[in-house]
Amino acid sequence: MTDAVVLGWQQRIRDAAASGRPLRIRGGGSKDFYGQEPVGELLDTTPLAGIVDYDPTELVLTARAGTPLAEVERVLADAGQMLAFEPPHFGPGATLGGTVAAGLSGPRRPYAGAVRDLVLGTRILDGRGTELAFGGRVMKNVAGFDVARLMTGALGTLGVLLEISLKCQPLPKAVTVRVLECGAAESLRLTCGWAAQPLSLAGTCHVDGRLVVRLAGAAPAVAAAAARIGGSAWPEGDALFASLREQTHPFFAAAGGPGRALWRLAVKPTAPYADLGGAQLIEWGGALRWLDLDAGADPQPLRAWAASHGGHATLFRGGDKAAGVFQPLDETLLGLHRRLKANFDPQGILNRGRLYPGL
Amino acid sequence: MLDSAVSSRLAALLPPEAWLTADEDTRAYECDGLTLYRTRPAAVALPETEAQVVAILRQCHQARIPVVARGAGTGLSGGATPDAGGVLLSLAKFRRILAIDPESQTAVVQPGVRNLAISEAAAAHGLYYAPDPSSQIACTIGGNVAENAGGVHCLKYGLTVHNVRRVRGVLIDGSTVEFGGDALDAPGYDLLALINGSEGLLAVITEVTVKLTPKPLLAQVALASFDDVGRAGLAVSAVIGAGIVPAGLEMMDRAATRAVEAFVHANYPLDAQAILLVESDGTPEEVAAEMAEIKRVLAASGATAIRVSTDEKERLLLWSGRKAAFPAVGRIAADYICMDGTIPRRTLPQVLARIDEFSHRFGLACANVFHAGDGNLHPLIMFDANVAEEAERAEAFGAAILELCIEVGGTITGEHGVGIEKIRQMCTQFRPDELTSFLGVKAAFDEHGLLNPGKAVPTLHRCAEFGKMHVHRGALPHPELPRF
Ligand SMILES: Cc1cc2nc3c(=O)[nH]c(=O)nc-3n(C[C@H](O)[C@H](O)[C@H](O)COP(=O)(O)OP(=O)(O)OC[C@H]3O[C@@H](n4cnc5c(N)ncnc54)[C@H](O)[C@@H]3O)c2cc1C
């Protein structure tokens, strides 16, 4: 079942391991900006494409890593299903493999789960060029450690993804978007209160003194929830959430501009609103806060603030990556990361340093 | 037996009543829910603070003594079976609920807190902890995380791994570590996913933050009868294919419903070859609409009768039979083993037919209970350990089912874990390279293999031995050991 493309990659990995020269794994390149600077010789995953198996009644799709994300979404939509974690594309070429490696989820994440929640299995090449399969194509599987989920969000530092099985979900029957005028603190109070009730939430966004809420599910439940949260109908509908997912919303256009840095702060949703020195856009019912700062802003206060609220800060776009993109790990966690990296990629050739220096 | 110097150093770390070595005291810990494996541990430690756990692990690490963590001991794969030369570390005294935070819909609990106790404590806020294993009145959250436990509501609300935010634990060298956090993701590798389902091999869990879910306003369950097991299996796919994700979708065959009726009187139709329980929850309007759709699909799939619960009392009654299935079978059979494979849903009819064939071939009865929506099978193989060869036949029957699960593209365990019970089939499901990789993950956390040794992941050497054992069936090494 190993095809010519994979055989070729195995040889390249073995050569790279022998020479110690790193490989830079890349799908559509839509997430080149994310993480520490990629280094090494290009390993292009797009030749390994195609949906391997999809049966809507199983709610499982299996596809090769280089399959365009857009193709996966189209096939699912034709069958009335979706990837509920709403992965951002960030460009036309986004692949399924890059989506899983980057581990990023969109506006629906708090309500439908993250990428890792829906990954059921992966087939990979490790840093020795050995083909390995973890997890599977079934909903429940506890045989062996959950390495399939470990690969999710590892930014390709533990293996080259070959094939991925994901759980799919039916598209909601009804979607409604509401808007309320309020400040950030009030918005947080409202969204935390709503999250404790059965309200069909499917996305929240606070920016520029406005809280926009998306509700999705069965039509009667969505109507009841809309009445419950009040406000008024949002004329743009779902398009706003598409612009958050793809960061085409004006907030992100400004934050991604020259001399700016876009910070991503993932925190406990109840963390109070804090002035962190720049404009904020709040998603995920308070659990995700985007911050537009000067490129030269000191990361320390942000990291400290996020940590004090149970979370972490990431330099998402722009700014100075030399100071580190991701929140530093404590000694014990770093030790575990190093030893896991050594297990999967002993020569340290796969996406060297993309996640943390030395990994 | 522990070296006496080591033993006294360990004993000094705990109050006298929390360090047990006498035979009559350690006996209570000799097995978990898989009772056919029994081993007395050299000692049982009952710490009540994390500092004590750290001190014990550090000592054991230094002296290279194996440690087996234990919650309530309800595990069904032998995961908490003690090591004869090691310490059995019970987390039973860690039973405090540290915080319930309705604002962030989370609870912070110690590992020995019972699954159901979390929902009970959260109820005042209209919240509950969604994963509901049938053992939920007894099993602990630490054990749930270690096994990535599931329940009848996991189809819609996810498994343990989907409902845990943060796990605090102690590594074998005594260092404390936190996986995940209060945010929805954490930096670096997803070690939180890795610790779920790690069967006590990677760290001792000392604290867990779980996600709580708002209680639905209403829940209703439909009971559908079928005159053919295969048709019931197809109805399961039809429900999912119609875009419905029920709150629960369970199936029982006739052998199971008969056993249950004699035990709890859940009012199940005894003439049906199989029944499905399909639950819908949400707002009253939502449930009404979804239930109408469920009934339509079930009828179109050939259900011979459909009954929908009209109040909470009736709903609980209909579920009581499903929840009591294991003990009910325990009453009609001298012994039984519960298998736990998962298969692609579409292969249900084919797999059920094969299990029926096996039942005839091995001459043993089998009752089938499934988390059908997830394709997770629980065939209960009935036998009598006192009848010569029956235990061996039951084991062979079970092995045939597991191999069938692998053959149709499934897995040998959906929620009960590998433990020692399925360690042999790990050699079939995974290739040597994959097992080596698992062993590398283990070594990254526990270089000397001291935490729960011999469980979950076989060494290649053991797989080779098993291979030999298969060939030389007539002359098993150590015939005195039970083989389940
Ligand atoms: C009647 C019955 C019905 C059941 N139904 C279900 C079901 O529906 N779904 C399901 O998933 N399971 C079910 N089970 C199996 C069992 O209840 C679960 O596996 C449960 O999660 C075990 O919890 P426990 O506290 O009893 O753990 P134990 O049996 O004590 O331990 C299980 C494993 O977890 C490890 N462990 C325990 N605590 C810790 C800790 N603090 N740190 C590190 N490791 C730890 C142990 O070493 C062992 O490997 C059922 C069992 C019975 C007897």
Image (tube, coloured by chain):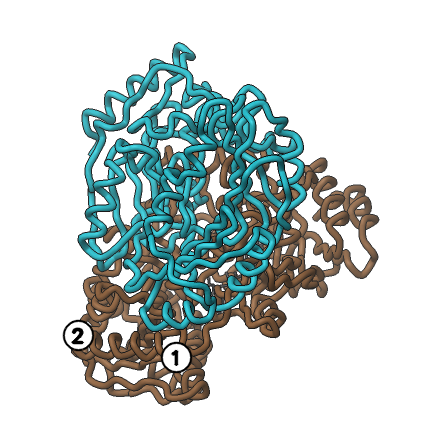
The answer to whether B74 is drawn above or below residue B294 in the figure is: above
Discs 2/1, front? 1
- Chain identity for the colour brown used in the image: B
Q: Is mark 1 within 8 Å of ligand 1?
A: no
Label 2 crowd bin: few (<14), some (14–19), many (20+), radius 10 Å = some
The answer to whether B132 is drawn above or below residue B325 in the figure is: above
**Looking at the image, can residue B171 be seen?**
no
Name the foreground residue: B423 vs A300.
A300
Name the foreground residue: B414 vs A151.
A151
Q: Residue at x 29, y 87 (%)?
A: B270
Q: Residue at x 64, y 44 (%)?
A: A274
Q: The residue tagged with tag 1: helix, strand or loop?
A: helix
- Mark earlier in primary sequence (2, 1): 1
- Chain identity for the colour cyan used in the image: A
Q: Quadrant of residue B179?
A: top right
**Spatial CA span between label 2 and label 1:** 25 Å
Q: Quadrant of residue A216?
A: bottom left
The answer to whether A280 is drawn above or below residue A346 in the figure is: below
Q: Is residue A170 left or right of residue B165?
A: left
Q: Residue at x 44, y 30 (%)?
A: A256
Residue B301: give its label: 2
Name the foreground residue: A188 vs A55.
A188
Residue at which label 1 appears: B284
